[in-house]
Image: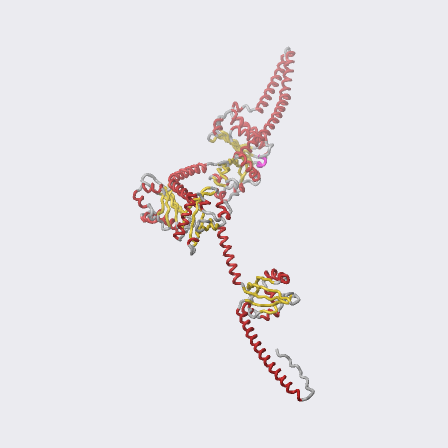
Amino acid sequence: MPHPVEPQTPDPAGGAGIEPAADRLHHQILSLQRELAAEKRGRLAYEVAHARLQYLVSATPVILYTRRPTGEFGPTFVSDNVRTQLGYRPEEITEDAQFWRERIHPDDAARILPEMGRMAAAERQRYEYRLRHSDGSYRWILDEMRLARDSRGVPVEMVGYWVDITERKHAEEALQESEQRFALFMKYLPGVAFIKDAAGRYVYFSERAGDVFGRDIGELLGRTDEDLWPPALASRLRSRDREVLAQRKPLQNVETAPQRDGDHHWLVSKFPLPDRDPQTALVAGIGIDITDHKHAEEALRESERFARATIDALPSNLCVVDGDGRLVAINRAWSDFAAADPPLAAAVQPPVSYLEVCEASAAAGCTDAADFARGLRRVIAGEQEQFYLEYECPSPVQQRWFVGRVTRFPGQGPVRAVITHTNITARRMAERAVRHGEERLNSILDSLNDVVWSLAPGTYEPLYLNAAADRLYGRPRGAFLADRNLWLEAVHPDDRRRVLASFPEFLREGVSELEYRIVRPDGEVRWVRDRGRVIRSSGAVVRLDGIVTDITDLKRAQDALRDNAARLQRLAAHLESVREEQSAAIAREVHDELGGTLTVLKLGLASLPRKLDQPEQACLQVESLVDLVSAAIGTVKRVSARLRPNTLDTLGLAASIRRLVGEFSQLTGIAADLRLPRLPRLPQERSIAVYRIVQEALTNIARHARAGQVRILLGRRGDDLVVEIADDGCGIDERELEKPDSYGILGMRERTQSLGGELSIRGSPGHGTAVRLRVPLTRQQAGTK
């Protein structure tokens, strides 16, 4: 810089001082010119140096900067090469105090900013962090800075530089990832990796070596095979190491080495690690434990031997074909079957095409062979997994049946299919016998009047019903097989709960017998007896079988028997009452009439001796006594006739009926039309029974009919006596026939049953009543009917 010109003081003497002053001024001017020239040269050198520095800075990847030592640590200067390195203008960075902080990666800002606050203590720091580029990507930056202080030691600024280390970071990450992959590869390698030097010492072992030797890897390094293995194995291993180094190519072999749990088989692959100095060459290798594989091979060989023996032991003819239908393998049964027919033996040996054999048979007219070939093609093509065909193959000796099956090999691999031909002649014959037996059994079961049934346990679904079900239930048995609840719907509503409640006990006890009602579709109610049995196999319930019997007629007979018994009881009581009344009436009649007559007769006879001396009076008294005896005899006849008509024993049934009808008309005034053809003589008990029935019928007409005429017909029809009595009265009501106190009708029915006959009473209101009796003429005929 030029020095300032000091002002000159004027010379007080005048002109004498001007020249020296001019000289001095000139001197100063020259000096100033020299200084100006030196300053110009220095400025030029500065500009050249500055330009050189700017070039060097812009050409280097290092970005120089200064920043504030406190606060936001905002940059105050950034070299211009920040444009090429990070894509920002220097003034963007220096004019915004938050610019740098806002562009640090958030994950790194939390780590870097607190450390910069401790800069005063460290004086110098070095950081690595990510900084956002102007294109939005993040770059890894090496940031090294130093704290500058003034003469008093006060921090004035931070001076430092940034270097883009993104490529180095990526390389480090790639290297680290590669090392991690290698470490993982070695960790999970299914064997042991190792490296030996030329002297045979182990210099590297993978992680699994410790498990194999049972030692820490550090104890294994530096040892040789002689230290780790038996002598023979060590010598063999060392010999192969030398072979690998000499030939400089990989070598693979299987070694057997002892371990704590026995011998293990190892597949060992060795290869050289070349070096310029053969003396320092290394041998690397990997050993894979193939013990399980060896055992698996042995098991596979044993399995193949077992499978071959098993297949050869099969009675079925078996072969395997490939994707073209050619025979790959056959079993012994196939060979033996073919050997029985020499032309066939050559035609069905590998590698003959089995499809061609089938097609040749089809061309000869065998439709089964054509069907089998089509099925085999579908299986080979993968259109279906299996094919099945039963066919007849007669021989000159017997009729034979076979079943052919084609099954495709599962999984991936070459297409293979197994063909088997099994002789099912015995099964077919057994099925035929069973079928015939079932037909006979079904014929027998269908001829039964009882319903035979089978139910499935648990669901109670009908499995079988014979034809009797159609007749008993009035429904087709197919409807029961289609609807498992139909049998329950057929049960009378009042009996369903009882029927359902019986099943647990049925299953528990194993047998059941139950009577209930069923309702036919037409509304008819029938009584049935259902007997069942639980069928077990190996302790498990497999079926419920039973028989349903229609007991409606039996129930009606039982009801009738109970009604008859009740009627008999009432009739017996009535007869006893009638007997007592008759006895009382007879007793009164005998006492009043016969007793009085006999008493008078006794008194007359007692007084007769006193009148013997008076003949006329005695004769009159004797005549009076004779009249009393006649009256007594009439009384006896009347009482005995009431008890039993004597004409039955003397004149027979016809005469007794004729007399009975005559007395009936005389006493009642009802006109009677009696027709009595010639009747055979009946046994005494039948005559009295028929007489009493006719007598009771006439008595009922006299009491209740209000009839004006009655028609009576007795005649023989075949081996039966038929009696028909019809009146024109008011007609009996059906309800009166069932009254429990209709003892007359009850007595008629009981007498008819005792004779083995039939009695019908039909009344029509306003048109009278008709009684029809039919009884066998003899007891033997009654028994046969």
Q: Quadrant of the N terminus?
A: bottom right
Provide the major secondary structure of the magenta segment.
helix
| Percent position of residue 530, x then y | 52, 36
Which residue is farthest bottom? 15
Pick whichever, 331 or 425, lies toward us. 331
Q: Residue furthest left?
A: 343
At which x and y percent is residue 110? 61, 60
Nearest the camera: 522 or 322?
Answer: 322
Relative height, residue 641 to residue 265 (above, below): above
Q: How many marks?
A: 0
* Left or right: 603, with 475 as reference point: right
Depth check: give the residue in front, 223 or 394: 223
What scheme was used to colour the molecule?
A: secondary structure
Residue 139 belongs to magenta span: no
Chain part drawn in magenta: 732-737
- In the image as oriented, which residue stretches furthest toward the top? 613
Q: Is residue 149 above or below residue 590?
A: below
Q: Quadrant of residue 748?
A: top right
Q: Choose between 486 and 697: the one closer to the eye.
A: 486
**Position of residue 711 in the picture relative to residue 230 (left or right):** right
Question: x%, y% of residue 686?
Answer: 52, 26
235 relative to 781, above or below:
below
Name the side, left or right, on which 401 lies relative to 211.
left
Examine the rendered structure and indicate whether residue 424 appears above or below residue 80. above
Residue 747 screen position, x and y as percent: 57, 29
Q: Is residue 661 visible?
A: no
Q: Is residue 517 visible?
A: yes
